[in-house]
Amino acid sequence: MAVYREGIEETIEAHQVNIETGLSSEQVIKSREEFGSNVFVADKRVPLWRKILISLQDVATIILLIAAVISFVSTYIEGTGHYFESLLIIGIVIINSILSIVQEGRAEDSLASLQNLNRMQAKVLRDGEKVLIDADDVVVGDLLVIENGAAIPADGRLIKAVELQAEESALTGESLPVEKNEKATFESDDDVSLGERITMVYRGTTIVNGHARAIVTAIGMQTEMGTIAGLLNSEAQNSLTPLQRRLVQLGKNISWVAIISAIFVMGLGVIQGMDLKHIFLIAISLAVAVVPETLAVIVTMTLALSVQTIAKKHAIIRRLPAVETLGTTNVIASDKTGTLTQNVMTVRQVWHDEQNHLSDVDENLDEPAVDVLSLAAISTNVEVNISDEKKTYAGLPTEVALVRAIETITSREELLRQYPLVEQIPFNSTKKRMTTVHELPDGGYIAITKGAFDVLLPMIKHGNSERAEEVNTSFGRRALRVLAIAKRIFDVMPESPTQEFYEQDLTLVGLVGIIDPPRPESAPAVEKARLAGVKTIMITGDHVETASAIAREIGILRSGDLTITGSELAKLSDQELDKHIKDYTVYARVTPTDKIRIIKSWQRQDATIAMTGDGVNDAPALKAADVGISMGETGTDVAREASDIILTDDNFATIINAISEGRGVYIKVRKTINFLLSANISEILVIFIAMLLGWGSPLLAVHLLFINLVSDGLPGFALSREPMLTNVMNQPPMAKHVKLFAQGLGRQIGLNAGLFAIVTLVAIWVGQNAVIGGLNPNEQIGQTMAFTVLSLTSIIHVLNIRSEKTLFSIKYSANPSLVNMAFLAAIITLVITLLPVTQPLFGLTMISLGHWAIIAILSLMPTIVIEFLKYIRPSLFRV
Ligand code: ADP
Ligand code: MG
């Protein structure tokens, strides 16, 4: 029988689970031996031979292979035996594919290892203890302890569920939560669809309400999710980031330029009566040389490396495009509690209503404070553990503060013995209150409601509300978070008691003021963001006075800025909100649904907004924001799943670091484009102009391919490791739809390509016309000089594009591999030009020392000109 139809007893029986203590360690080992681990079979990696095949499908590669064939055939017909050129082209194709496969593989590996950081955890009951384990270690038969906001790690049969609702869209496509019921039965024998199997919870779904226990019935590939895992994997991998997509588009545009210039060059050659095979090879290799094949790989590397750097700074990127979006972010909407503040809460003041007594809480609690705090502390979900005489507390920080305060006098356990818990209606940030019901020692019941003062106020019928309001305001001004405690005593429990029943006719007990100091990093981070043109706004469920006090302290609320509360927000129309959205920096007493309105309004102002969130109800807002940020330490699984980025330290300052890194990505990509396209465009210019001037063929196919692969390829890869040389955080963020060639990049490339073309053409002219060192000028000397000058110029150029400041301002240690690679490329260039064995292979010839002197001057010339221009007008060279 299908598991979901089984009765609870049957499931328990089948797995031999003790539902009080869970599996024993022996049972876990046995189960793992029998059923294995809770992992999906490693997703099939594309095998190497397929990768090679795929890389051969590249247009540039196909053009190259055609060139090799043409070269081979014509050599055969001519019978000269010079097969080197065709072999070299094929060699280049092979090296090129190996290089890109290796680099891409590395990028994939580093991204995969990050996914491991993002491991899911699961809470299970084993040997009588609740333990948090790696989701992979869950075994069949495990007793899952399921809390609100949890992600389900394996398929399980519910044995106890309280108001449980699961969001199963990943599995069923249905986005509305499904109500679960462990007791449900299925009448007809027909198979029931996944979404209707309400006695079960499934891997890959999340809990959006209630709590439950379930016995794991299927793990790994046996889960429902396992059966569709293959589908999901392939989908996730094929998506490109916006930047990658734009580069693919750029590549396509350049391919057109390449093809058109190739046709043009061929036409020119034919008119000038050049050798057909020769001109065809030039045209084709020009086409190939123009396309920056390495660009895409370098960008992937850059993204992967940045994701790693960001991870070291305590943020895990869940979706790659988020790195880029961070770079354009200009508004951060941050939670207060835990993100801007330390979330280490401490009770500071207690006000007793009946006695109208205010107590400062430090070492010793006085009588009235004990009265209020006792009730507050038993109305919590804090677990107190005592080990080695030291008490540790687990639970919501606000509640831990209450319990920690009372534990100096008595214990929560002792209090609960006096007032046994009957029922509880848990806290959530929409209701901003919670209620527990207890038996009274002398019969009857007490319902304790604690929550935000302004939420409780309308329900309070007995107590000095006027004085309470004053106290509330004074607490708030002192940046204290206020909890109001109220009670209701009744004799008999109605048949079906409701929340309304418990929370009517309340008597105020008192107010508790809790301090949650700001993190020391918050104020500097807010300031750093401000200098970087990023506005920080605070969104909190807390009271407006408390929120403003803290916001003022950390520089979010400055003179001229406004605050607004959730209820005031509700009264504003969208148009009114849009008009004033830029003035508000503190949103107090908001609910998670308000967050979406705030996001939407900013987005209508064309802002890129990052938003933090931790609760179940924050998930929609996290999705709506341009960058959704969740909390690794305190957040729920639901929020994490909905987010683009997880902060592993929950710290606001981490967001600012990630933004800085995101901006760096864009800059690195611009440098790469600048470097690669400058050389490629100069190649077109040289060939065009030389042919128009009737100088024959200025550069051979092998020359262009060599420059493409070695002179540009080697230093190019090192650009992905380039550190941030300029302070990206003292300039405004980039516009949302910023163009790749914006801010003068196109002009820079034009200038560079022009300079390169001029020196190369001069080199050709000298080689073809000047008698130097007793050597008579000829076409081959011209080609040798052109090749050496263009190759060396391009290699040196990698140093120019790094900064708008002089190249001497950058230390070797900033990016050693870049300098090393440039050196290597230069040495290889010199070696093949100087060695008599390689000269004929590359169509080069011996040149004199005088030629070399000219080559040295010409190769340095563009850099000298650029250095001079940088000196008089650095802004021209903005990176
Ligand atoms: P934040 O957005 O700052 O995280 P919360 O949503 O956690 O704010 O809390 C909002 C308000 O709800 C608080 O000001 C407090 O009055 C009340 N509150 C917070 N935690 C609890 C709790 N555990 N029980 C009852 N009320 C609470
Ligand atoms: Mg909160």
Image (cartoon, rainbow, N blue to C red):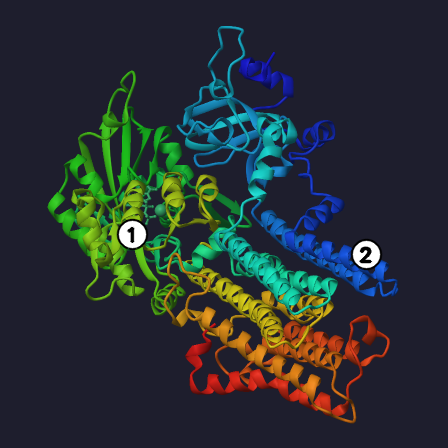
Relative image position of residue 576 (x, y in whole percent):
17, 49
Secondary structure, mark 1, is helix
Residue positioned 35% across, 30% down in the render: 424
Question: Dividing the image into 4 quarters, which one contains the N terminus?
Answer: top right
Relative image position of residue 159 (x, y in whole percent):
51, 21
| Mark count | 2
Relative image position of residue 243 (x, y in whole percent):
49, 55
Residue to which mark 1 is pinned: 602
In the displayed structure, does residue 590 sit left or right of residue 384?
left
Relative image position of residue 601 (x, y in whole percent):
27, 49
Residue behind label 1 places its C-beta within 8 angstroms of ligand 1: no
When the figure is inspected, residue 85 is found, relative to residue 234, above or below; the finding is below
Residue type of the residue flagged with mark 1: Trp
Secondary structure, mark 2, is helix
Residue to which mark 2 is pinned: 73
Residue type of the residue flagged with mark 2: Val
Residue positioned 27% across, 27% down in the render: 499
